[in-house]
Each structure stands twice: as C-alpha cells, then as structure tokens.
Image (cartoon, helix red, strand yellow):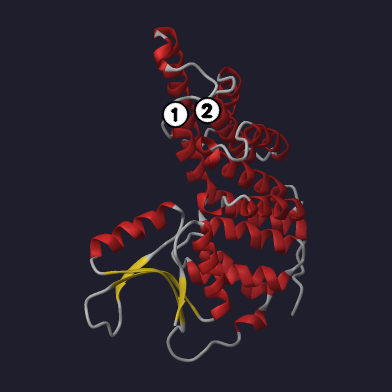
Amino acid sequence: MRSPSDCPGSRISRLTAGALGGCVALACSLACAPVVGDAGGPRLAAGKRASVGTLALKRAMAEASDLFLAGDFEGARRAFRRLAVAGDDSRVATRARYSWGRSELALGRPGAARLAFARALEAAPRGLEEVVDLRAYALAGLADVALASGRPAEAIDSLRRIEDEGLSGRLAADVLLYRRAAALDGLKRFQAAASDYRRLARTWPSSSLAAGALARAETLDPAGSAWRPAGPVAYEVRSGVFSDRNSAEEAADALRKCGFRPRIALAPAAREERFVVSIGRFDFREDAERAAREVERAGFPARVAP
C-alpha cells in the first residue's frame, strides 16, 4: 500500500473542512431549537420579569443563529459569546457556548473554539438527560478542533468518549464516521482510514461526504478497491420487518432522527406482505456487522441478512 505524499497537517485541514461543512446544519438546528424549562434559570411562573428575560434570550439566540446562517460568522461569534455570559447557567447559555465554538471554528480560530466547546461540555454534565444532545455536540466539536489543529490523537479520544458514553446515536452517523476516518488518516493509519471512508460511501451513498470519502479511500489504498464480489450485494442490515407499511414508516422515521438513512422494501419470497426496514447493503459481512452495532448502540434492533 502506498503512503500519500502530501503533508499530513495540510491534509487533515482539508479533510476537516469537508466534515465541518456537514456540521453547519447541526449548529444551526441546535441554535434555533426551542429552549424550554431553562435549567438553573428562572421559570416563567416566577413572574413577568423572568418571562421577559427568558423570551429576550430566546429572541437573541434566534438572531445570532440568523447571522450564522447568513455567513456572518464574526457577528454570530460576538452574539453567541454575549449570550453565553448573559444566559448565566441556563440552557440558552449552554447552547450559546456550543454555537460560539462553531462560529470560532468557522473563522479559523481552533483555540477559541476549543475553549467554547469545553465550557459547553462543563455545562452539560454526563447523565443529565435534558442536555445529553448538547454533550454529544460539544464532544464532536472538540474532535473537530483537534482535527483542525493537526492533533488527530486528541480527535480519536473525543470520538471514543462519544462512543463510550453511548452518544453516537445523537449525531449524524455519516459525519461521525468521516471524523474518525480523518483522524485515522492523520495518524497515518491509512488502511484503517480507507476502510472507514469506503464504509461511509457504501452505507450513505447520498451523503454529501460520500464522493470525497471514496476518492480519498482510493488514494490511500488503491489495492483495497481492486476486488469486487460478482453478482448482487450479499449482506443487508435490517432493523425490523412489519406487517403494515405505517409501522415500517414510523420505525424508519425514528432511525432518520438518529442520523441513519433507512429504506423500506417488500420482504422477498414472503407468503404474506411484509415490509423490511433496512439501513444499508454491503459487499462484506464485516462492514454489515459494524453498521449493525452502530444501529444497536442507538437503541434500535438490527441484524445482518442473510
């Protein structure tokens, strides 16, 4: 297997740019999401003054998010930073710290982004259900900072924390896998990186990262793509078989909310009409089994067929 000739540091920066593009929607959806029952802050029932303060924070959060969406990252950075302080220990402040970090990263300031993500992580303690999504996003942000700074080992540590804490299902699965592949790439574990890049392209072919991932895999490990099994794809990851399409659609919707891309098809050779919800099809059983484990970690049933 050939080693790539380009500089590892610059390569990781380019790879991270692609991964961060997939995270912009994540930052915006988080910043714009409704904030209810601010932990550590005043409840609406505490009085009109508290209500006005909470509504003002929400309005300011929406305005900051609009700046981010418009590409005014400097304006968004200042707005999110003010909210991170003004919101004190509320959930608005925790969200603002995360979005502040995304703005800093978009401006090419990984050091400042690291500080903001670390503060968001501190404000989202492990085991507290109401901030579990924020904790997952903050750890992913720290992984992106490490990649952008040329520290792939630190990125691997953050990604391991996400997996160890059972937070993988809270993040877009294709972007999460891209982060790991980029980190392995930076560590010069080229064969493992190529395997993850190919897995991304096979499992999520409609992902915006798929084409770049496959191209990178073939650059890192050209021999790995030389052999392809003849005939149809052999292995499929299934998450359920249902007697009616409505139940299958509900199961598929739940999987989509966790970042998977399910499809629904009629079960082959079934005596009665059955609807199969599948996650992906694979040339190799090892790839299918790894994808099935991801689905199970997200709390869904999964099995490899045949």
Image: 161 above or below 74: below
- Verify CB contact (< 8 Å) between mark 2 and mark 1: yes
CA separation in Å, label 2 and label 1:
7 Å
Image: 28 above or below 233: above
Q: Residue at x 55, y 20 (%)?
A: 87
Amino acid on which disc 2 is placed: Arg
Marker disc for residue 35: 1
Amino acid on which disc 1 is placed: Val
Q: Residue at x 52, y 89 (%)?
A: 229
Does residue 115 appear to the left or right of 262 in the view shown?
Answer: right
- Within 10 Å of disc 1 (Cα), the crowding (few <14, some 14-19, many 20+) is some
**The N terminus - image quarter:** bottom right
Residue 279 lies, in percent from the top left, at 43, 67
Q: Nearer the viewer, residue 284 or 67?
A: 284
Q: Secondary structure at mark 2?
A: helix
Instruction: Quadrant for residue 255, please give it.
Output: bottom left
Instruction: Quadrant for residue 122, please give it.
Output: top right
Does residue 117 appear to the left or right of 188 in the view shown?
Answer: left
Image: 110 above or below 82: below
Q: Nearer the viewer, residue 203 or 44?
A: 44
Residue 102 lies, in percent from the top left, at 59, 38
> Which residue in the protein does label 2 denote?
91
**The C terminus - image quarter:** bottom left
Residue 78 lies, in percent from the top left, at 59, 25
- Within 10 Å of disc 2 (Cα), the crowding (few <14, some 14-19, many 20+) is many
Q: Residue at x 49, y 16 (%)?
A: 42
Q: Secondary structure at mark 1?
A: loop
Marker disc for residue 82: none
The disc, 2 or 1, on the residue closer to the chain's N-terminal end is: 1
Residue 241 lies, in percent from the top left, at 33, 70
Q: Residue at x 42, y 86 (%)?
A: 232
